[in-house]
Image (tube, rainbow, N blue to C red):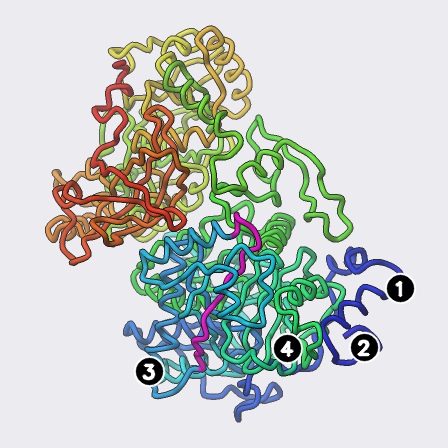
Amino acid sequence: MPPGVPMASLSRALRAAASRPGRSPAQRLGPRALTGGPGPTTEKSVPYEWTLKETPGPSAEAQSPSRPLPSTASVVVIGGGSLGCQTLYHLAKLGVSGAVLLERERLTSGTTWHTAGLLWQLRPSDVEVELLAHTRRVVSQDLPAETGLHTGWIQNGGLFIASNRQRLDEYKRLMSLGKAYGVESHVLSPAETKALYPLMNVDDLYGTLYVPHDGTMDPAGTCSTLARAARARGAQVIENCPVTGIRVRTDDFGVRRVAAVETQHGSVQTPCVVNCAGVWADSVGRMAGVKVPLVAMHHAYVVTERIEGIQNMPNVRDHDASVYLRLQGDALSVGGYERNPIFWEEVSDKFAFGLFDLDWDVFAQHIEGAINRVPVLERTGVKSTVCGPESFTPDHKPLMGEAPELRGFFLGCGFNSAGMMLGGGCGQELAHWIIHGRPEKDMYGYDIRRFHHSLTDHRRWVRERSHESYAKNYSVVFPHDEPLAGRNMRLDPLHEVLPYDYYGAYGQQAHRDYTYGRLLQGDHTFDFPPHHDLIERECLACRRAAAVFDMCYFGKFYLVGPDAGKAADWLFSADVSRPPGSTVYTCMLNARGGTEGDLTVSRLAPSLEATPLTPAFEGDGFYLAVGGAVAQHCWSHVTSVLQDRRFRCQLIDRSEDLGMISVQGPASRAILQEVLDADLSDEAFPFSTHQLVKAAGHPVRAMRLSFVGELGWELHLPATSCVPVYRAVMAAGAKHGLVDAGYRAIDSLSTEKGYRHWHADLRPDDSPLEAGLAFTCKLKSSVPFLGRKALERQRAAGLRRRLVCFTVDEKVPMFGLEAIWRDGLVVGHVRRADFGFTINKTIAYGYIRDPSGGPVSPDFVKRGDYSLERMGVTYPAQAHLKSPFDPDNKRVKGVY
């Protein structure tokens, strides 16, 4: 509490913080917030009956580990918090013998012990809904059944508060998604909310979302039970054993691999390490030469005195006030996320079962919202404060998967204070990742490979983006939101933005008015945005005349070397062994048959001399072009496959050196014929081919391809040539109606044509057969390729789900997550949706299942009566097995 203020009421604390002399609370935060607050202090009272610190066992001063260290282990998990214990448990449950967990002090002693332990079942992500469901199942069913112990799980329900229409719309979206996963939820009126939670002020509410099966976990009870269940299956848990180093070996192929873990008490030889060290994960990563992009921040809540009538109430999230209210017996824990969190700059490796002094200047901003929501808090005393460290990442998603720098080194960290509720689902997926090489679910959003390698150790980028993700944790999740932080890191020739303003925190001057922020504000809606008509003009111009797209952000790689042909056969599902000059659209699969990426692969002619557009090589060579947002993922996937199969070839990254401009539409041939020194007729330049040409005097690799379903060419060229070639194209296109078009137009056009977007309607847990991309798979040949066996098994058994296109006649915006109804039953949810301006309808794509568990045949699709549920309202929909726009693919061939 502020000086002179006893542990009294929240309102008194607020007044005391506001009245301290000198500056206002917000002004006082600047320099000190950025340079870190006070160091850890003695333990305060956390709202749990017991912690593992209080149980018998080795103390921090003990000189030996809790049990002898084995000389070898199949897997070593570092860190005994929620993720470490869940990962060990699931490894053991999946049959891994000889797994060991090393904890430097006691289980939960880092950040897990003081966590609030909330579990909310609904999130704006289908994958996270599944992960949360598994965590809930583990703590409420599996562990009690296996051990006979109670984990501390309390099912008291969850209540999301909506103070405005947009927030209630967001909750209705969650409710619709929940129906696809059997999560019970109800949108309540203010009166119904008052009846459920009598102590709540509902005068300013639009409504609430009530999820009766949400609840609360106990960190000590959960982790100790996980450890017991893992030990019963042969795993070992060794406490008081700090890790001091990771030993690395380089194999005869030049690949760095994990060899051993070194501790103060000896070393353990192992081929696999899992970094579950939470706030300390960056330190563990540095031991192995692995970059771990996270930051440590103070995160706080206060525990109130007893509140009459609060017993059995649901947990509450008032997102607009940025506070949560967690039921704690007959009291509440009150916490939230502020825009000026305190960074913990010097993370101490001696920190265990400790907390920081609460900075009331920072925390005070949550009190007013909490009192407004539950007025009795104004006269309720504060029993204790809890301010501990938590790790936060640049996109508010965990860091998981195998590190690209070191084989056998896995991450399970950076959980943004959600490690308890995501721990079960993520622990299971991490175990599958280690055992099978891939998780079962689509974990790309958590995969460390989602970040470009140039950013993961860029401290300013990590800091800015992590701050923004913390500050916006309770913001409405809009489908087209984008970060304002961490920009200017990678630029194409036409890009310019402002520096990050920390949303006006830490004494920074907030940007007042600039184009990017203004456009982004327009996208903060669940309706059609104000610039809907601009997107329409760009789309219709592309369909009727031509549009130019800046695609410089694409990943551009060369695959060359003695085994490049063998590698291409194995990596790519399509047949790319065609003559030089050919370009093929293909998928890359994993062993489960899931799609790790889609891309174009162009066969190159050998070149004895390097040029700006071709490396010097003999034998086979290929040019790979892949969407920029997933370029790092694809690079890492290809690299891992090359290493695992020991192919003798090189993967060369030219993404920063090359740009790409795409010209699409009926007039594209006429426009480019004035710019390129080549014959662009169908006979001279067929679809799906490429040629080296000149454009306005600059070297260009021109490809006749389309990602929007029109006649068009991609121009791959040196980055330094982008501006002059772009100007030449625009000058030639002026009389043809050529327009600039953006990525939102690409989204609409490609959705309308039925082209897939990787990680929207095509993910690592979707096979090409399910996604309608069987034509990309060389199954009619005898050539083996990665994932082929899985596809053959799937084809023989029949598809249990299938991607279907839906159109809605009513002009209503959809974005994904809408429930798909067939004959009165929910059979899936929408993965991707947009408005098709040419057909003037909403278009949606989603995978559907047969509720009886049978195969989903084309006939099954045709027989159904469909509707799509958007925010609780259903709209009649028509199902299509082919794109409703140009189903015969005439336009890409120039037939209009």
* Mark 2 surroundings: few (<14), some (14-19) or many (≥20) residues within 10 A: few
Q: Position of residue 732 (x, y in %)?
A: 47, 8
Mark 3 closeness class: few <14, some 14–19, many ≥20 residues within 10 Å: some
Q: Position of residue 532 (x, y in %)?
A: 48, 29
For badge 2, the amino acid type reads Val
Residue tagged 1: 21
Residue 303 is marked as 4
Q: What residue sits 56% from the left and 47% below the top?
A: 455
Q: Badge 1: few (under 14), some or many (20 or more) residues near its Cα, within 10 Å?
A: few
Q: Amino acid at mark 4?
A: Val
Q: Which residue is mark 3?
A: 234
Is 401 a magenta residue?
A: no
Which of the numbered marks, if any, corresponds to residue 5?
2
What's drawn in magenta, residue-wise? 152-167
- How many circles with numbers are drawn on the protein? 4
Where residue 814 sits: x, y (%)?
39, 40
The answer to whether the residue labelled 3 contacts the one labelled 1, judged by CB atoms less than 8 Å apart, is no
Please tell me which residue is depicted at 22% across the width and 36% down the height of the picture. Answer: 880
Give x and y (percent) for residue 506.
75, 53
User: Mark 4 touching mark 1, by CB under 8 A?
Assistant: no
Tell me how far mark 2 sits from mark 3, CA to CA: 52 Å
